[in-house]
Image (tube, helix red, strand yellow):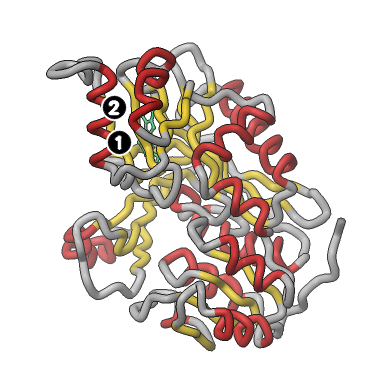
């Protein structure tokens, strides 16, 4: 059902205060909106560039209600915002995407079930809620495999990779139980290891009227579970790119999603596309759009949640985006001397290992 547009000048509320919220706030301000950030974090890359911020816990109902009263529409920058907080806000103000999308995507089990339900392919998986499930996981999934926490995993956190020899030094069941225990003994899934040739993602936006605008398929390299580099166009056959986009469009439609959505996938040697996970938000692999697309993903998300027409998604140049992680920030100034590079820093002070501090996009003549 299309909704009335939230006009420029209105206030957009964003739950979450990291770099994604920061870049959303910049995109929103370029369109004349004001932004109010809500987050429990005192250090807030997003609040630095927003017109208002609330530092409070997501369980603080009074703070949530006051926030809702001060904004015209709300959205979130990451999928681990508690569903209850979004439901509470949604009683007072439109929240896009909605709580339903959030609850599906913040649990890897419901997310994978949902993906399968759209007809897309996933790695084989089973739930592992406790040691009693180890036998069935060992039989049905076997080794190599990946044990992942159902909730709160990101950037490779909350997962253990067990190689072909995962069962050495004990029974297969014991290896799985050890991994599950190391992950905190919380509900997990055990997933078959995908022998992929490359990883890709599709970033698209879907409006409240069901219109979809997709960017070119992106090729991603992860290191230690964290995205390192994204390249567009992906160096994959056109038929594989088309298939990937079709899968992502189907998922966005099935979710009745409003906003930007990213679908991460593996490509196998025979050209198969296997969906790994969905992010119901702007995505790190879409950062290149800031410098090399007609409309960047952040503005596109704002357009979608405010009911404005979606912008063009044409790629204006080939691009390679590299994250600056932890200490890599120290050499960042050198990027400023590169004529075809753009530097984006997130305003974070503490360069902890594994922390995304900024990114660089390098532009190349358009190849196709
Ligand atoms: P995730 O947190 O699910 O996005 O996983 C982070 C990264 O770990 C992925 O981008 C892959 O590089 C790797 N990975 C995750 N699951 C699998 C799998 N089933 N098979 C192979 N590699 C995986």
- 128 up-or-down from 186: above or below: above
- Residue at the (51%, 16%) spot, across then down: 271
Residue 188 location (% of width, % of height): 40, 37
Residue 363 location (% of width, % of height): 41, 50
Residue 300 visible? The answer is: yes
Residue 142 vs residue 76, the one in the foreground: 142
Image quadrant where one finds the N terminus: bottom right
Q: Residue 180, labelled with which disc?
A: 1
Q: Which residue is mark 2?
A: 176
Q: Residue 19, labelled with which disc?
A: none
Callout 1 secondary element: helix
Residue 201 location (% of width, % of height): 51, 38
- Residue at the (38%, 54%) spot, across then down: 361
- Left or right side of 5 for 338: left
Residue 288 visible? The answer is: no
- Residue at the (65%, 75%) spot, across then down: 31
- Residue at the (42%, 36%) spot, across then down: 129
Residue 10 location (% of width, % of height): 71, 83
Callout 2 touching callout 1 (CB < 8 Å): yes
């Amino acid at each position: 059902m299309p909704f009335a547009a939230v006009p420029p000048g209105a206030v957009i509320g964003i739950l979450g205060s990291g770099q994604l919220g920061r870049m959303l706030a910049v995109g929103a301000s370029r369109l004349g909106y004001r932004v109010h950030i809500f987050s429990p974090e005192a250090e807030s890359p997003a609040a630095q560039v927003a017109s208002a911020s609330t530092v409070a816990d997501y369980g603080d109902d009074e703070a949530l209600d006051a926030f809702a009263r001060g904004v015209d529409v709300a959205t979130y920058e990451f999928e681990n915002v508690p569903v209850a907080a979004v439901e509470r806000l949604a009683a007072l103000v439109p929240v896009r995407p909605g709580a339903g999308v959030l609850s599906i995507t913040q649990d890897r089990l419901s997310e994978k079930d949902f993906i399968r339900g759209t007809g897309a392919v996933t790695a084989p998986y089973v739930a592992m809620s406790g040691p009693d499930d180890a036998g069935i996981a060992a039989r049905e999934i076997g080794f190599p495999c990946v044990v992942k926490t159902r909730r709160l995993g990101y950037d490779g956190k909350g997962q253990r990779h067990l190689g072909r020899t995962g069962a050495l030094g004990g029974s297969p069941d014991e290896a799985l139980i050890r991994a599950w225990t190391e992950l905190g003994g919380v509900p997990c899934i055990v997933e078959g290891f995908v022998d992929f040739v490359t990883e890709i993602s599709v970033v698209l936006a879907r409006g409240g009227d069901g219109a979809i605008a997709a960017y070119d398929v992106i090729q991603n390299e992860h290191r230690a579970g964290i995205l390192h580099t994204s390249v567009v166009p992906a160096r994959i056959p056109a038929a594989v790119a088309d298939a990937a986009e079709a899968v992502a469009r189907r998922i966005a439609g099935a979710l009745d999603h409003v906003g930007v959505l990213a679908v991460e996938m593996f490509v196998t040697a025979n050209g198969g596309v296997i969906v790994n996970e969905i992010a119901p938000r702007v995505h790190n692999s879409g950062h290149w759009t800031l410098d090399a697309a007609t409309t960047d993903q952040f503005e596109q998300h704002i357009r979608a949640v405010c009911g404005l027409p979606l912008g063009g998604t044409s790629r204006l140049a080939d691009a390679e985006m590299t994250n600056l992680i932890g200490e890599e920030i120290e050499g960042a100034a050198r990027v400023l001397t590169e004529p075809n590079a753009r530097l984006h820093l997130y305003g974070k002070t503490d360069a902890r290992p594994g922390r995304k501090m900024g990114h660089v996009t390098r532009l190349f003549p358009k190849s196709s």
